[in-house]
Image: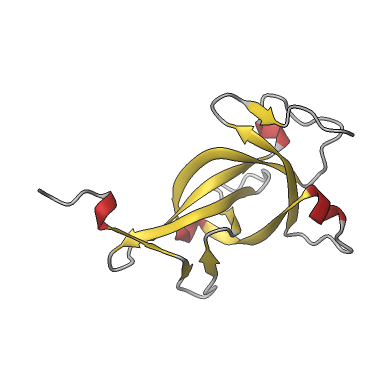
């Protein structure tokens, strides 16, 4: 029997992206993806769930869960959403590591509020977004 596509894949804990950046990524990291077109939209941010490539670690991809901006959901941006607020979704996709623009930090709301200085790469989340249902969990929070 021939090997399946998934059986020929090698999964690793971390990977250093070759090139000038030499960015080291690992499962659990949050990264900004390079958009297909640079039209000034909000950054595309994902959480890395896994890293895989061929047995020779060619065609390396990340398995990533999307963070959604409030504007990207049915509910839209509400008055109580922070400017740097994201929703962690259950929507996963594979992306080539070459699409990664850099790392960022996505913290819980409590962690974010404790920061003395918010940097350009700091974001926070407090809602989960169920992609297929268009639903947020929890459905409400104290404001």
Whole-percent x and y of residue 68? 64, 39
Counting labels gives 0
The colour mode here is: secondary structure
Instruction: Judge from the rendering whether residue 98 lies leftward or rightward of residue 33; answer left or right.
Output: left
> Which residue does the image show at 54% across and 27% down from the upper left?
132
Instruction: Judge from the rendering whether residue 125 lies leftward or rightward of residue 3; answer left or right.
Output: right
Whole-percent x and y of residue 122? 75, 57
Looking at the rendering, which quadrant does residue 54 occupy? bottom left
Instruction: Judge from the rendering whether residue 4 lies leftward or rightward of residue 94; answer left or right.
Output: left
> Which residue does the image show at 58% across and 50% down from the upper left?
46
Residue 48 in sight here: yes
Q: Which residue ends up furthest to the left in the rendered image?
A: 1
> Which residue does the image show at 35% across and 60% down from the upper left?
53
Looking at the rendering, which quadrant does residue 106 occupy? bottom right
Which quarter of the rendering shows the C terminus?
A: top right
| 50 versus 12 height, above or below | above
In the image, 18 versus 127, the foreground residue is: 127
Whole-percent x and y of residue 34? 56, 53
| 82 versus 57 height, above or below | above
> Which residue does the image show at 25% across and 49% down from the upper left?
5
| 18 versus 117 height, above or below | below
Looking at the rendering, which quadrant does residue 127 occupy? top right
Residue 36 in sight here: no
């Amino acid at each position: 029997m021939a090997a399946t596509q998934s059986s020929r894949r090698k999964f690793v804990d971390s990977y250093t992206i070759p090139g000038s950046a030499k960015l080291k990524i690992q499962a659990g990291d949050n990264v900004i993806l390079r958009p297909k077109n640079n039209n000034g939209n909000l950054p595309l941010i994902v959480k890395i769930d896994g890293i895989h490539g061929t047995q020779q670690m060619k065609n390396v991809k990340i398995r990533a869960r999307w963070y959604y901006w409030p504007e990207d959901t049915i509910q839209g941006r509400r008055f109580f959403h922070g400017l740097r607020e994201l929703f962690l979704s259950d929507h996963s996709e594979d992306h080539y590591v070459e699409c990664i623009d850099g790392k960022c930090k996505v913290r819980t709301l409590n962690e974010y509020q404790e920061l003395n200085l918010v940097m350009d790469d700091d974001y926070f989340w407090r809602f989960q977004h169920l992609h297929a249902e268009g639903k947020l969990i929890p459905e409400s929070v104290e404001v």
